[in-house]
Amino acid sequence: MKLICIGRNYTEHIKELENEKPTDPVVFLKPDTSILLKKQPFFIPDFSDEVHHEVEVLVKINRVGKYIAKKFAQKYYNEIGLGIDFTARDVQSRLKAKGLPWEKAKAFDGAAVIGKWLPKSEFEDIQQINFSLKKNDIIVQKGNTSHMLWKIDELIEYVSKYFTLKIGDIIFTGTPAGVGKVVANDKLKGFIGDNELFSITVK
Ligand code: ZN
């Protein structure tokens, strides 16, 4: 399975990183080895001094598809989740400056947190989902899926032009404002509404 990640999908996060609004979604992949194992702490890798949390709404693909039209996209997922796209920002900045790929900053072991899943049917409108991240019990990121530049069904249409979507693939839909550095002993908890979907410790 693969993790398909979207960058710069919320306007405020774009401002925060001083990126230009893209004309196409920014897409990158993480391998399955980047998934943080259940109940394991997240270890800050020794090649970075600046790992940032990016809380993101996740979509789990449940059918094989390619060239999926937006109007049929909702048939390809049944579950919504929440996770973290951990990013070694210092490494990413160096790679970006040289126009190099981001994998070393984004796809390292443990860089993908995947929380519990909720049935899509629990949501009246998946483009009106409130989600948040608490660091040491203080809210550091707060978002609503209505602020996505590309909506979930549009993302499925877009990424399936390039990659066949397979059962179990997960889409990370981008992070809202408030990304920030983590340090050892931080506790990160992710919420959709009041529902806690993950809790991890940084080491
Ligand atoms: Zn991200």
Image (tube, grey):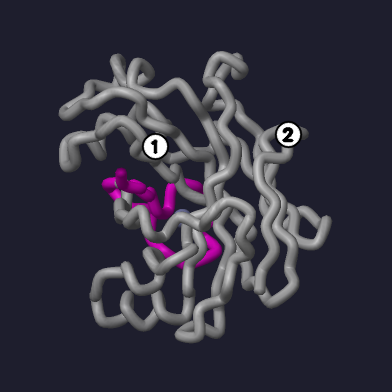
Quadrant where the image shows the C terminus: bottom right
Residue at 36%, 83% in the rendered image: 94
Residue where numbered disc 2 is placed? 195
Front residue (pair 80, 93): 80
Check disc 1: other Cα within 10 Å, few if <14, some if 14-19, many if 20+: many
Residue where numbered disc 1 is placed? 150
Q: Residue 71 at x, y = what percent?
A: 30, 15
Q: Earlier in the sequence, mark 1 or mark 2?
A: 1
Q: Residue 8 at x, y = what percent?
A: 42, 53
Magenta includes 9? yes
Gap between marks 1 and 2, in whole Å? 25 Å
On the question of residue 142 being in view, the answer is: no
| Apparent side of residue 163 relative to residue 8 in the rendered image (left or right) | left
Residue at 67%, 35% in the rendered image: 192
On the question of residue 33 being in view, the answer is: yes
Amino acid type, callout 1: Trp
On residue 1, the disc is none
Position above or below: 156 against 86 = above
Segment tinted magenta in the rendering: 1-24
Q: Does the residue labelled 2 lie within 8 Å of ligand 1?
A: no
Q: Do the residues labelled 1 and 2 touch (CB within 8 Å)?
A: no
Q: Residue 164 at x, y = what percent?
A: 18, 36
Q: Residue 196 at x, y = what percent?
A: 72, 40
Q: What element carries label 2?
A: strand
Front residue (pair 77, 124): 77
Q: Is mark 1 on a helix, strand or loop?
A: loop
Residue at 68%, 76% in the rendered image: 183
Position above or below: 125 against 7 = above
Amino acid type, callout 2: Asn
